[in-house]
Image (cartoon, rainbow, N blue to C red):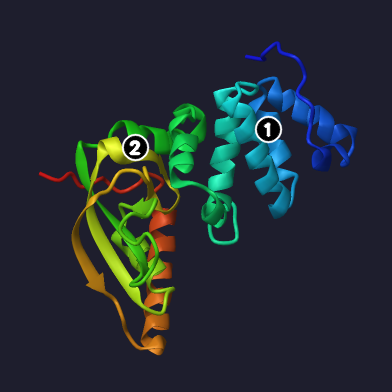
Amino acid sequence: MVRKSPKVVPPYWLAIRGQEYIDAFHKACAGNELEASSLFDSFEYANQLRLVREFWELKQVGKITGGVWSAVLSLAWTVGRRGSILTDALSKLNRGELAKMFLEADKRVLMDDIGLARFESLPDNFIVYRGCGRFARHRTNGISWTTNREQAEWFALRTPTPMLLEAQMPRAAVMATFKYEWEVLKNPLVRVKKTNDVDLWMPPEARFVRMEGLGKKLRTAAQRQKKLPKVVAVQ
């Protein structure tokens, strides 16, 4: 549904791109989620980050719909030099504000059908995994987790000191779920109970072979099944 509201003045860096960009910006601010997504995709990395910040500010003052914000947020989480624009910006972004960005999003727009169905069927507690370096910042309180152990191992083995974490995730701590990489986004303000950690260190040459093997297995699994693996509930 298109909102009837005064036109929002586009930022200078967007306006200098021309009338086509200005019109798309106005349509997005009026409630057009597709225009918002197309506008985001039309920019390079630096301006995508600018657009996310611009729309978040507009969302905070009620000048765009939750659907428009969610459409941009969904794309922003899957684009970036290290996996996500928001991850790239974490050094300048308060973790409480990041949580607010997701908690205020419209889940029906933020997630695709598979991710939403998975989110709605989560048990009260379930097992998740996280692959990272032993000395990584926010190691146990990271945002991104997965229900697929091999996917977590793959991420861990990309670091010099690979560590696999296993934890109990309460449903109340989950902000969103995505089918890509079987990802579970945890509220950064809620801590999870770690149940196990495994040191995956191995010689570099062996690690390369291990990563190659995991990569092939994950690609094969993705091709064979469109649905995500079942979540393991914690008794």
| Residue at 40% across, 75% down | 211
Q: Is residue 181 left or right of residue 55?
A: left
Q: Earlier in the sequence, mark 1 or mark 2?
A: 1
Q: Amino acid at mark 1?
A: Ala
The answer to which of 43 and 149 lies nearer the viewer is: 43
* Label 2 secondary element: helix
How far apart are labels 1 and 2 at the CA level? 26 Å
In the figure, 153 relative to 168: above or below?
below
- Residue under label 2, please give it: 118
Q: Position of residue 155 (x, y in %)?
A: 41, 66
Amino acid at the residue labelled 2:
Arg
Residue 111 visible in the current orientation: no
Please tell me which residue is depicted at 29% across the width and 57% down the height of the picture.
129
Residue placed under numbered mark 1 in the picture = 36
Q: How many residues crowd around disc 1 within 10 Å: few (fewer than 14), some, or many (20 or more)?
A: many
- Residue at 53% over, 48% down: 93
The C terminus: image quadrant: top left
Is label 1 or label 2 in front? Answer: 1
